[in-house]
Image (tube, grey):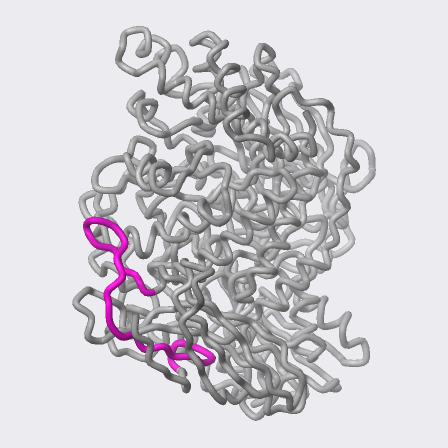
């Protein structure tokens, strides 16, 4: 059965399909059934010939689909981060983003895309927020649901994650969240409900953490509301290693990943035989797994001979440009009007962060940096570059065009795994010096990993050369050992050891153009906690004799240029999976760099390359500030499009950006005695800022463009009887008062100060983006669902009779139009 056959089968009588799947599941022995409920390996499920079931492949996929291997020889499209996508406030764009993810999945033979991540930005210190959409449940729901629908439109399963209340990384395997019923339903469950009810998600991922003392793979929240109230009939997939007991088999948890080992297997067969786990529960899980197989074309499947899609990187460029948020443009400095010279500084200008660390990472075929993007877009402009400040605390991989395989003389590195007898187990040429194996590294009686390459430095002088890996490693240059270290990581998170290992470096003086034989010998004894996994990088970082001198050089270059562009941002030790942030401050001397450049040239633009909020104490000292998130592989070209005015900066903030860290009303991500208390209830993000009465640097929904708008009128009407889910229809009339066409995101908020229930000061109820030609007036219609007016109480959702205030405007702190609505 191909995926096209699957679509027609799903469209037939659901009862007949359920009966067919039930018959197949019942025909299997208990051992066959249980075998299907644990992965076959790191990324795939077991095949079962007796059921006509092929293996299904799962892949990380929030911002690009990696496939089963992390390998530069099979690159993926590196899309902009989830925060960039959500900043566009455009569900249609999110649907297309999902379609592109599905096309990548088809190209790589993937059946289930492990995304979208629809946890919330509860605290700006959340280390993985670049992978999630917003602090607001409605915006998250709209973007996440569109992503799910886009993926599944192509017969690929989406997997909304991480269910539920996994809005932090600290102690994520063991911490328990204490949260009220109201906050759970109105805030944290809301995006998942939409992804299931409206998006029709075929799978959901259960999270590592516990809620109210029960780990999520065993928690009854998997039954209610997920299945019983929302009608979810799909597969609950565990986060990797999140299933830890037989108790999860009695819960609504269906698939334990990864495999082939785990807590189920023979132990679960024995538990069923002993009557400790109902046999019916096992068969139900198998039925759901078979239904997923029908949906993705894995049951009675014929070889899929469809041509593999060719993915256009131009979509990554479009998403990033649409998501860039202009938050300051004093004096109308932007868009730039063909300046004669631009002085660029900041390490992220040359080595940008295009994606966050951890499971959201893919390997792109190329990355266009801001520096390259500007030079391509403005060939008549002299674009100079100075480092200015070092951002990285680790190392960057070495450029491929500087590396030669010693045996073939062609580009690359020679990689060998040896066993304890010295025999070569794996010998291959690789084309990147940052290597990751996720479940596909050689296994057995291994002793050493060797990496050898001939390196020709691009510039002369001192450089810090070294490696990032966990374990004992030796680096030699031309046969002489120059560095030996045994790195380790704190904690018990295997993702950190593989995806964000610590680095060790030594300063060496190298000459440009000369060839140096680099050799790494890494001990494989006592390596990764997960079989077949390893992450290692041979790389470098600048050797800085004087940070003050770097800043002075950049400032002097800015003084001589017509315009200065400073690119600042975070590094992989600030924003990544596996740990939370400890501060909102930019790493290194970047704040000092910005101030020095701005003092030297008042026409300074700052580009912020971070996945989530950072402190910007210099924001009023520069003329323009652009928030660009992690911009994907076309980051540089998209940025140049916006700076030059070829594209409107259409982004709006999906999350509040604070002025001072001390002002953030909800910031704690550190469990105490294993418990993280969401004591703020429903008041997170802008809701918490409004309740605290504190003004942030830039409020939720804020963003400037290259034109201006006037909000002229607001009309609110009760809908007809045709749509019971719609409570009100809002019409907003606005006029483009500028000299060029532009895009506005009209936002509608509700409030009810005299409510008998705990409510936010105001909350987002609907939005719509609209393109308006210069000087023209348009009317935007926005339907407000009944749920936007409801609140959660002990017996479920309820509508409080009485009046609500409806407000409309460009962001949560600027709502010039108001009307009253009685329900």
Q: Is residue 804 magenta?
A: yes
Q: Is residue 332 left or right of residue 215?
A: right
The answer to whether 219 appears left or right of 387 in the picture is: left
Q: Is residue 480 above or below residue 791?
A: above
Q: Is residue 147 visible?
A: yes
The residue lying toward the viewer, choosing from 357 and 159, is: 159
Taking the image as shown, residue 230 lies to the left or right of residue 388, namely left
Which quadrant, please, contains the C terminus?
bottom left
Residue 503 sits above or below residue 732 on the image: above
Residue at point 68%, 38% (across, down):
106
In this view, 699 is above or below 493: below
Looking at the rendering, in which quadrant would you find the N terminus?
Answer: top right
Q: What is the residue that sits farthest to the front in this orientation?
A: 721
Give the camera-side residue of 53 and 436: 53
Which sits in the foreground, 395 or 495? 495
Percent of width and height locating residue 407: 79, 31
Q: Residue at x 50, y 42 (%)?
A: 201
Residue 98: say if magenta.
Answer: no
* Residue 592 visible in the shown view: no
At a point 42% along the width and 23% down the height, the residue shown is 285
Q: Which residue range is magenta in the image?
A: 789-813
Q: Count of labels shown?
A: 0
| Residue 353, horizontal then vertical, whole percent | 57, 58
Q: Name the spot of residue 581 as percent of width and height, x first.
A: 37, 57
State which quadrant residue 74 falls in. Answer: top right
Percent across and percent down for residue 162 are 41, 44
């Amino acid at each position: 059965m191909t995926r096209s056959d699957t679509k027609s089968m799903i469209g037939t009588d659901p009862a007949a399909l359920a009966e067919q799947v039930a018959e197949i599941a019942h025909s299997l022995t208990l051992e066959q059934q249980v075998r299907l409920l644990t992965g076959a390996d790191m990324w795939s499920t077991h095949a079962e010939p007796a059921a006509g079931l092929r293996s299904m492949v799962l892949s990380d996929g929030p911002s690009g689909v990696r496939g089963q291997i992390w390998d530069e020889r099979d690159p993926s499209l590196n899309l902009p981060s989830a925060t960039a996508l959500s900043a566009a406030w455009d569900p249609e764009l999110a649907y297309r983003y999902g379609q592109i993810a599905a096309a990548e999945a088809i190209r790589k033979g993937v059946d289930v895309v492990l995304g979208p991540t629809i946890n919330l930005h509860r605290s700006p210190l959340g280390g993985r927020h670049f992978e999630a959409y917003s602090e607001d449940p409605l915006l998250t729901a709209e973007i996440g649901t569109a992503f799910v629908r886009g993926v599944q439109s192509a017969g690929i399963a989406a997997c909304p994650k991480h269910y539920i209340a996994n809005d932090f990384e600290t102690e994520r395997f063991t911490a328990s969240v204490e949260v009220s019923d109201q906050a759970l339903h109105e805030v944290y469950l809301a995006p998942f409900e939409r992804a299931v009810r409206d998006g029709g998600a075929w799978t959901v991922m259960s999270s590592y953490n516990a809620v109210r003392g029960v780990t999520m793979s065993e928690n009854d929240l998997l039954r209610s509301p997920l299945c019983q109230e929302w009608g979810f009939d799909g597969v609950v997939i565990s986060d990797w290693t999140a299933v830890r007991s037989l108790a999860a088999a009695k819960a609504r948890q269906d698939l334990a990943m990864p495999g082939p080992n785990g807590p189920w297997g023979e132990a679960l067969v024995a538990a069923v035989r002993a009557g400790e786990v109902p046999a019916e529960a096992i068969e139900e899980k198998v039925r759901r797994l078979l239904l997923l197989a029908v949906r993705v074309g894995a049951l009675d499947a014929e070889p899929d001979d469809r041509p593999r899609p060719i993915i256009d990187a131009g979509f990554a460029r479009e998403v990033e440009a649409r998501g860039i948020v202009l938050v300051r443009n004093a004096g109308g400095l932007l868009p730039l009007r063909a300046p004669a010279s631009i002085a660029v500084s900041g390490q992220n200008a040359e080595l940008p962060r295009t994606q966050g660390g951890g499971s959201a990472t893919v390997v792109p075929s190329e990355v266009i940096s801001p520096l390259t993007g500007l030079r391509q877009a403005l060939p008549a402009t002299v674009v100079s570059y100075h480092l200015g400040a070092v951002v990285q605390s680790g190392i960057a991989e070495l450029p491929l065009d500087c590396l030669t395989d010693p045996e073939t003389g062609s580009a690359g590195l020679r990689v060998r795994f040896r066993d304890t007898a010295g025999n070569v187990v794996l010998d291959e040429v690789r084309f990147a010096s940052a290597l990751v194996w996720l479940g596909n590294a050689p296994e057995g009686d291994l002793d050493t990993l060797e990496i050898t390459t001939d390196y020709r430095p691009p510039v002369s002088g001192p450089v810090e050369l070294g490696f990032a890996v966990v374990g004992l490693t030796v680096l030699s240059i031309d046969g002489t050992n120059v560095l030996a270290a045994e790195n380790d990581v704190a904690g018990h998170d295997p993702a950190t050891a593989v995806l964000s290992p610590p680095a060790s470096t030594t300063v060496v003086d190298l000459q440009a153009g000369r060839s140096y034989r680099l050799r790494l010998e890494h001990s494989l004894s006592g390596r990764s906690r997960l079989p077949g996994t390893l992450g290692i990088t041979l790389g470098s970082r600048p050797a800085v004799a004087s940070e003050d001198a770097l800043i002075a050089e950049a400032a002097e270059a800015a003084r001589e240029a017509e315009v200065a562009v400073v690119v600042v941002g975070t590094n992989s030790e600030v924003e990544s999976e596996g740990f939370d942030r400890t501060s909102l401050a930019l790493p290194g001397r970047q704040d000092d760099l910005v101030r020095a450049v701005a003092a030297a040239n008042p026409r300074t633009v700052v580009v912020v390359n971070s996945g989530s909020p950072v402190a910007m104490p210099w924001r009023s000292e520069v003329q323009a500030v652009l928030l660009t998130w992690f911009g994907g592989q076309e980051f540089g070209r998209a940025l140049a499009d916006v700076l030059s005015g070829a594209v409107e900066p259409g982004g709006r903030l999906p999350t509040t950006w604070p002025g001072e860290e001390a002002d953030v009303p909800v910031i704690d991500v550190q469990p105490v005695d294993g418990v993280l208390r969401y004591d703020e209830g429903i008041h997170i993000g802008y809701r918490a800022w409004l309740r605290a009465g504190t003004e942030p640097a830039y409020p939720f929904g804020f963003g400037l463009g290259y034109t201006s708008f006037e909000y002229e009128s607001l009309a609110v009407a009760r809908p007809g009887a045709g749509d019971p889910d719609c409570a009100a229809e809002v019409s907003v009339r606005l006029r483009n008062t500028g000299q060029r066409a532009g895009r506005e995101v009209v936002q509608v908020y509700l409030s009810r100060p005299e409510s008998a229930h705990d409510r936010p000061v105001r909350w987002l109820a609907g939005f719509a983006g609209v393109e308006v030609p210069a000087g023209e007036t348009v009317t935007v219609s926005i339907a407000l669902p009944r749920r936007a007016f409801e609140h959660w109480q002990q017996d479920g959702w309820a509508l409080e009779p009485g009046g609500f205030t409806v407000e409309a405007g460009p962001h949560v702190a600027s709502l010039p139009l108001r009307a009253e609505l009685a329900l």
